[in-house]
Image (tube, helix red, strand yellow):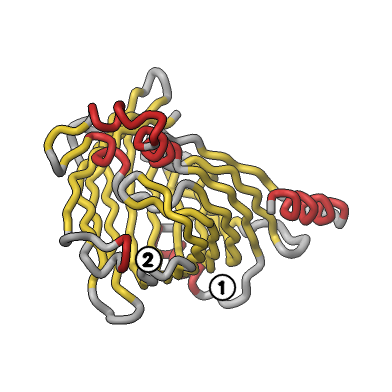
Amino acid sequence: MKFCIGVILFYWGLLGYAGEWEYEVDPYYSNVAYYQTLDESPIPELGERTEAQVYSDLFFSSYLPRFFLLEASLNPMPVLGVMLKSDEAENIYDDMRVTQKLNLVEVVTAGFEEPYALSVFLGNMVKYRTKHSDNEVDSQSKGFMGYLASYGHLHIRKNELVQDRWGEFEWKIKGDRITQGRLLSWSFRIGTKIHDNPFVTDEYYVAVKRERVEEQGDIYSWIKNGGLEFKYRVSQQTGKTIGQQIILDKKIPLTDLGWVISLGVGFVRETREKYSGPLSLEESNTAFVLRPSISF
């Protein structure tokens, strides 16, 4: 798969289409991505736009995709959780148990069901400008809208790997607004996930995520330095709820270092509809989630 992607990018380069690479390093979601327009025209620069105007511009142009992105992602902390529960490190996992139903490894890894993913995005991308409080202009902001297909061959259930070739297909809109000392990022997506393993339920879902960081904002404010993540999932077969999650994220900017420390707190719920057969849950359960993270 990596070889095929490399060949595609090589020949694309020979045709004269120069793309851009981006990467992100995070304890929970790290990725490397290559994005490219489908013709020789540059990525549109819309000028100054409000957030609502960005949504509108993307929506009315998304019917004709002119941009694609290839991404390989890894979820380091969930992978570490699997390693700690393996036979080679079983004592470490057991030492993290607080009660019969509460293990600290599960607390910091709950909510992630795959160790990695390979993804292709097809849609539209725009760049736009926003004003600082002093009316100076910054042109770093970007917006995306389109269709995302992802694939993997492993599933994580309670920090254990399950063989499962899965495919995920979604429509999403995401973007950011970057001004001096302030970052606002947002995403909204609806999609479906199907599983080759018959004991993992196929699903539909809707998800929303929004984060804001202000270097000079009130460090105790959840509005100026915080985030929200919500996801609701239902079974394709029955329409019954198979899971929900809600996480509130506190951001602490370290201005001198250029770092942002995050601490997410929330809950992940799975119902008995989520699995069947040998993977069945004895009962629906709600797990407490704690997600420490740092970005720089």
Q: Which kind of residue does numbered mark 2 sit on?
A: Val
Q: Is residue 164 left or right of residue 202?
A: right
Q: Which residue is mark 2?
A: 200
Q: Is residue 251 visible?
A: no
Q: Which residue is mark 1?
A: 61
Quadrant of the image containing the N terminus: bottom right
The answer to which of 157 and 139 lies nearer the viewer is: 157
**Hey, which residue is sitting farthest right in the picture?**
14
Q: Position of residue 11 (x, y in %)?
A: 84, 55
Q: Secondary structure at mark 1?
A: loop
Disc marking residue 31: none
**Hey, which residue is sitting farthest top in the picture?**
256
- Residue plotted at (47% across, 39% down): 136
Dot 2 crowding, Cα within 10 Å, few <14, some 14–19, many 20+: many
Q: Secondary structure at mark 2?
A: loop
Q: Position of residue 236 (x, y in %)?
A: 35, 78
Q: Position of residue 182 (x, y in %)?
A: 37, 38
The answer to which of 237 and 218 lies nearer the viewer is: 237
Looking at the image, residue 209 lies above or below residue 146: above
Looking at the image, residue 164 lies above or below residue 248: below
